[in-house]
Image (tube, helix red, strand yellow):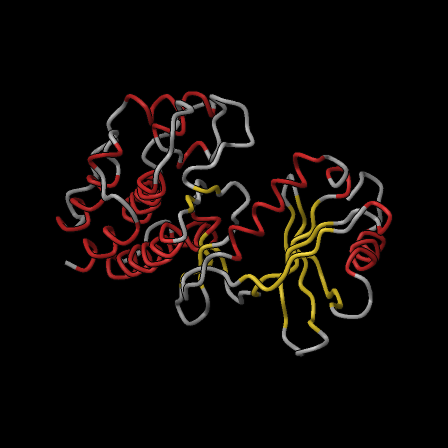
Amino acid sequence: MTPNENPDAELQRAQAVLGGDRYRIERLLGRGGMSTVWLAEDTGTGRLVAVKLLNRDLSGDPEFRERFRNEARAAQSVSSPNVVDFHSYDDQPPERGGGCYIVMEYIRGESLADVLRRRSTLPEHLALDVLEQTAHGLSAIHAANLIHRDIKPGNLLVTPEGTVKITDFGIAKAAEAVPLTRTGMVVGTAQYVSPEQAQGRQVTPATDVYSLGCVAYEMASGRRPFQGDTTVAVALAHISKPPPQLPQTVHPHIRELIGIMLRKDPERRYADGRELARAVLQ
């Protein structure tokens, strides 16, 4: 939304991008630096969907359009009960307004970030359940030769039934792909970024394992493993500092899992989501 734009005008503009036939927008769900997410009804099926729309001021930028297109490709290639379902993608030419949008499964519930803001920590059986389900979702992502690169509580949605769904493939990439960002640029969220991401090095599925380890640490202790006054300070801590010891009240199995997930050397972590899921169940 532009600074003085009426919310109704923003909704009407989003509806104009989608057209009036297939999807009818109901309300705004969320807003990010690159896109807005809307709740809409699929008039063909009657089901509710989430529509992620590339911001208008970015729709003319070829790099951002390519990132959005890559997000759609990544989401389309993964199928798992623990990953938000992809429905469709439309990339309009400039003569049709140039809008880009992704239609996804709408998840009733809240993010893990919302849960942790309310509860601080999770009981150990629930923390292990979140960890296992997310590992299964990562297993499907990694099996598709993708790396999510931004696992954090805000990107883990929890349904009322307790199912965990990984969302937001905005910076996911193929394991062997040349990144769109320039060499050495840190991609990810600083509080959950792996040492190799913080150094701009090659990432592997073990990168997602590390980020999930940061989430697990937070679920168990009520705090993130590394904090600092700036994102740079936090990223440097991920590179060089050991995480503070977890409270002795945390179960030894959980302490061991998190300790392995947060190893600085990716070769010494669980290799991918599948290996982590097996370890959680041991």
The image quarter in which residue 39 lies: bottom right
**Location of the N terminus (image quadrant):** top right
Residue at image location 30% in from the left, 47% down from the top: 216
Residue at image location 77% in from the left, 51% down from the top: 92
Find residue 149 and report its horizontal and vertical position in percent. 43, 40
For residue 101, above or below residue 34: below
Find residue 164 and report its horizontal and vertical position in percent. 40, 61
Find residue 132 and report its horizontal and vertical position in percent. 29, 58
Residue sitting nearer the eye, 153 or 268: 268
Is residue 223 at all visible to an observer of this figure?
no
Q: Is residue 242 left or right of residue 21?
A: left
Find residue 17 and report its horizontal and vertical position in percent. 80, 55
Residue sitting nearer the eye, 104 or 235: 104
**Location of the C terminus (image quadrant):** bottom left
For residue 38, above or below residue 232: below
Residue at image location 49% in from the left, 43% down from the top: 172
For residue 187, above or below residue 6: above
Q: Is residue 68 left or right of residue 2?
A: left
Residue sitting nearer the eye, 27 or 210: 210
For residue 49, above or below residue 99: below
Number of marks in the image?
0
Is residue 36 at all visible to an observer of this figure?
yes
